[in-house]
Amino acid sequence: MKQPLTLYNTLTRKKEKFEPIHPPHVGLYVCGPTVYGDAHLGHARPAITFDLVFRYLQHIGYKVRYVRNITDVGHLENDADEGEDKVGKKARLEQLEPMEIVQFYTNRYHKNMEQLNVLPPSIEPHASGHIIEQIDMINKIFEAGYAYENQGSVYFDVKKYDRDHNYGKLSGRSIDEALENTRALAGQDEKKNQVDFALWKKATPQHIMHWPSPWSEGFPGWHLECTAMGCKYLGQTFDIHGGGMDLVFPHHESEIAQAVAAFGNDHVRYWMHNNMITIDGQKMGKSLNNFITLDEFFTGTHALLHQAYSPITIRFFILQAHYRSTVDFSNEALLAAQKGLDRLLAAAETLKKLKPSDKNTVDAASLREKCYEAVNDDFNSPIVIAHLFEAVRIINCINDGKESIDAENLESLKATFNTFVFDILGFKSEADAAAADDHTTDGLMNLVLDLRQNAKNNKDWAAADKIRDSLKGLNIEVKDTKEGAVWCRI
RNA sequence: GGUGUCGUGGCCGAGUGGUCAGGCAGCGGUCUGCAAAACCGCGUACAGCGGUUCGAAUCCGCUCGACACCUCCA
């Protein structure tokens, strides 16, 4: 079952063969959301990208421990020295306990993820639940000599670290240049150098979220939680760390520095980063305030949306682009995704009904090979989808009697199609869930279609069309095929 | 300014140095009472200018343009 998977490693800027440290186990860590607002389209990208990674690794036989954190503390609005904790700010504005904010948006995030058919991770640790681990890590960094305290806050000595190791190897930056650029600003705060980052911040009196520590009543620095929690659950060195490209610097760069300082070695083998979703060519993001939330997509309630788009349409839209490319949002593109998805799912239904014949003109094995090749090549989902559309054409041709398939190839085609469409890419038919079809409905529909067939036999087109049009008003579409009428919800 | 990524036909979006991406839209046809669906056929697209090569959208150089990161952001 093992497949020759390759993936693009941000660290080496090359595609590399994937070889886990402790096969068959794989450790996967992905930066999750900061829960102080509703998830938007941008949040769907890493969730879906790494859902594909998670699903595929499992499919090819690995036992994956997938850790995706919830950030609920420590990220500040501005820089290290000013600004308010985001969660704390929201709590103050809404007069709620910070943990109420966290719980509220975490619940909503989970619901959105479920709608997108994103599988829950194996472990979903909260930063606030791992203060002890983070303090422990700061102690280790102190012991190694890369931390210093000032006024109750603790900072990472990037300049010193860079002399011994290499700060900037992930993002391709040189710390000397950063120092050059920021020299004019230096000395305005507690840090020795502007490039240093906080490991622990002493809380100001108005700061709501704070914990005791050896240095002060305060809260952990921004980059610490992922290193601490990743290493706690996946080990001091683990296989894959993922997240959005915008996290490469400084977040992931600093994560590496912390791990190297604390443990003496890099904690991550493969760094994977998904690209951004853009809107009018610009990154969709919280700070630009140009985001559309997932709920707004699902309900169509946003000025820029011409209609509602279902969760699986959003999933299809995202997977139709490679994860390292930007994707530009537009109604036109989403509508194209919706129609393409409908056609793919309709073919899945048709496939169920196909009958094998003695003759065969279909090479199911080759399709299967091509699909695996595409995923193995750095999770190239758009290529997989292209191959699946080739299968759609074949399925429809068989259904039309223009191609034929024998029992063996039919079994193989069904297995491949279902594996890739549903298990790996994670699409699903949304009508099914909504309909919850029962015997009564089926019986009624068969009766109605029978009556319409009678009308047609009598050339009573008016009656036949009235039935069809009325059903359409109930969002039921009737299609006349060679084998008689079929219906589906629209 | 520094570090990167990228510019593909109406829209979205893959791509290897040498017949093909794929989806959506469009046009023509088959089928159908009509419609829908489905199928078949149809588009000499690779930012610009040079260079390497027998041959480049694919390699190199330059120009132009876009985006991302360098503050929190998925």
Image: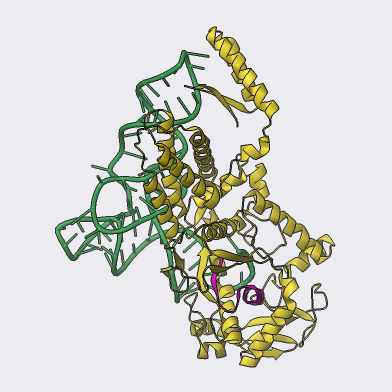
Chain colours: A yellow, B green
- The image quarter in which residue A229 lies: bottom right
Residue A486 visible in rendering: yes
The answer to whether A41 is drawn above or below residue A226 in the figure is above
The answer to whether A391 is drawn above or below residue A264 in the figure is above
Which residue is nearer to you in this view: B17 or A408?
Answer: A408
Q: Which residues are magenta?
A: A224-243
Residue A27: where, in percent of width, then height? 57, 69
Residue A189 visible in rendering: no
Residue A133: where, in percent of width, then height? 71, 79
Q: Is residue B27 left or right of residue A208?
A: left
Q: So how many labels did they put on this image?
A: 0
- The image quarter in which residue A49 lies: bottom right
Residue A150: where, in percent of width, then height? 71, 90
Q: Quadrant of the C terminus of chain A?
A: top right
The answer to whether A205 is drawn above or below residue A290 in the figure is below
Report if residue A446 lies within the magenta region: no
Report if residue A227 lies within the magenta region: yes
Q: Is residue A386 left or right of residue A97?
A: left
Q: Is residue A268 left or right of residue A226?
A: left
Residue A423: where, in percent of width, then height? 54, 50
Which residue is nearer to you in this view: A280 or B52?
Answer: B52
Q: Residue at x 59, y 85 (%)?
A: A263
Q: Is residue A191 left or right of residue A207?
A: left
